[in-house]
Image (tube, rainbow, N blue to C red):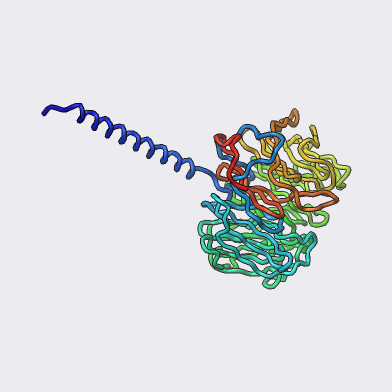
């Protein structure tokens, strides 16, 4: 059979169409794969609860001297809680002052549209009554929230249906700390573990995450504190670390039995910063009482203090006296923000201060910045709403770039602040103030591109 010129042209066009279709399919597949591989930030501290951002393909520099372009911006009310992001949804809580109610919001992570809300009444009796503090925890098809007055909820993530809820004051006779309930709960297998502060050994309580039934309770302390519970492995022993105003306690996460305890009496109940583990050591830092490094035995059953700060003053500090932010700790050095805004570096083996700077923050009581390691640099979100990319090393602080992320809206000590930790997910940063929650794309291929959001 003889093929004509028309036949060849038709076959060539078909092959071109087939190749283009295949190419577009492959591009779509790769794009989908990249989306699926993007990390979530489903709880306080991110996927591993360690405040480290591990996604790749992120911008090297931020555009200087202007506000970062948004993917979207959604109005919300006041609050201190940070966002949680998972499976294309963003969860945030706020306070409707006129209604004297707290609210849980679920947003579409792609466009910021509100998918559902749940509002419940609560009358604040706490200091700084400007909204809930605790970051939501997303676990599969459930999301858990804790309000400032001790209202805990389990919702279905898709619909906002309440699966179960409880109130710490009513159920456990909790004496609320002066600044309310703060510590973000922890999911461990079938448990939801959180600080409750109830009587009769209920400082920390484990709930069945599906039903809200109490599984076990542990520890006594008249003060609750504000530090989230953490699970670490020392030697072969998994341990639930609870840093409360009386001590740093390690307990068995399966039944609440005690493993070891280091007394550490904290002024004003200000156990706040998340404990940091490095090797067989554990680091904590308090506003008044300063830092302490603990070493846990190979068996995981004993612990001892390696070194402590020598100052109990918020002003005359000799180490690191953090108030809100959690320091970054590695085997050799510690980087954190001290009581009056000083970004400091300590020798991890001795606690000796090596340098300090105010370049990333400002100076004043409780001045704050959140430090998030990413690859070989750090993202720093300070309370003035700036997002900074910087290098931190034993030799000093090196700023690479900074832009404004959100406007500071909370008045504190005659300055406007933001005290809410951002979430880093989907190659983006999600941040809030008392008026809006925003998403900013930080993917490397989005550098310099104006987003279409507000």
In the displayed orientation, state which residue is furthest to the left: 1
Q: Quadrant of residue 183?
A: bottom right
Position in image of residue 311 (x %, y %): 86, 44
Q: Is residue 299 visible?
A: no
Q: Is residue 222 visible?
A: yes
Query: Is 49 on the left-hand or right-hand side of 369?
Result: left
Query: Is 401 on the left-hand or right-hand side of 17?
Result: right
Nearer-the-camera pick, 113 or 426: 113
In the displayed orientation, state which residue is furthest to the bottom: 170
- Indicate whether 34 appears above or below 228: above
Position in image of residue 367 (x %, y %): 80, 46
Residue at the spot 53% in from the left edge and 65% down from the top edge: 210
Figure quadrant of the N terminus:
top left
Nearer-the-camera pick, 361 or 291: 361
Position in image of residue 258 (x %, y %): 66, 57
Q: How many marks?
A: 0
- Indicate whether 79 appears above or below 291: below
- Indicate whether 313 appears above or below 395: below
Nearer-the-camera pick, 451 or 382: 451
Position in image of residue 454 (x %, y %): 63, 48
Nearer-the-camera pick, 74 or 357: 74
Residue at the spot 73% in from the left edge and 38% down from the top edge: 335
């Amino acid at each position: 059979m003889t093929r004509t010129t028309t036949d060849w042209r038709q076959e060539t066009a078909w092959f071109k169409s087939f190749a283009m279709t295949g190419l577009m399919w492959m591009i779509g597949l790769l794009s989908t794969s990249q989306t699926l591989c993007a990390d979530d930030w489903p709880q306080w501290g991110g996927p591993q609860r360690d405040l480290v951002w591990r996604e790749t393909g992120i911008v090297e520099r931020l555009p200087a001297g202007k506000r970062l372009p948004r993917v979207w911006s959604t109005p919300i009310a006041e609050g201190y809680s940070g966002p949680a992001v998972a499976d294309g949804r963003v969860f945030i809580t706020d306070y409707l002052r006129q209604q004297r109610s707290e609210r849980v919001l679920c947003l579409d992570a792609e466009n910021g549209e509100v998918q559902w809300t749940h509002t419940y009444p609560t009358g604040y009796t706490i200091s700084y009554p400007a909204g809930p503090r605790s970051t939501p925890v997303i676990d599969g098809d459930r999301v858990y929230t804790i309000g400032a007055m001790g209202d805990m909820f389990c919702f279905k993530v898709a619909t906002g249906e309440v699966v179960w809820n409880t109130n710490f004051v009513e159920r456990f006779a909790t004496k609320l700390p002066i600044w309310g309930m703060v510590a973000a709960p922890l999911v461990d297998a079938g448990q939801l573990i959180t600080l409750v502060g109830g009587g009769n050994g209920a400082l920390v309580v484990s709930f069945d995450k599906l039903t809200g039934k109490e599984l076990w309770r542990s520890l006594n302390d008249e003060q609750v504190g504000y530090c989230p519970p953490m699970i670490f492995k020392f030697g072969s022993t998994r341990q639930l670390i609870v840093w409360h105003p009386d001590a740093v306690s390690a307990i068995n996460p399966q039944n609440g039995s005690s493993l070891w305890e280091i007394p550490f009496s904290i002024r004003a109940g200000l156990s706040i910063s998340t404990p940091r583990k490095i090797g067989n050591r554990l680091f904590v830092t308090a506003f008044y009482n300063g830092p302490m490094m603990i070493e846990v035995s190979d068996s995981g059953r004993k612990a001892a203090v390696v070194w402590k700060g020598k100052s109990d003053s918020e002003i005359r500090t000799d180490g690191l006296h953090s108030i809100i932010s959690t320091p970054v700790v590695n085997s050799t050095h510690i980087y954190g923000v001290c009581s009056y805004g000083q970004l400091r570096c300590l020798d991890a083996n001795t606690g000796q201060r090596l340098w300090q700077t105010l370049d990333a923050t400002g100076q004043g009581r409780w001045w704050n910045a959140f430090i998030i390691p990413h690859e070989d640099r750090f993202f720093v979100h300070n309370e003035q709403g700036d997002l900074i990319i910087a290098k931190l090393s034993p030799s000093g602080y090196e700023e690479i770039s900074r832009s404004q992320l959100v406007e500071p809206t909370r008045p504190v000590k005659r300055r406007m602040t933001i005290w809410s930790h951002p979430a880093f997910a989907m190659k983006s940063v999600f941040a809030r103030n008392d008026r809006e929650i925003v998403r900013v794309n930080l993917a490397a291929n989005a550098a310099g591109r104006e987003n279409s959001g507000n």
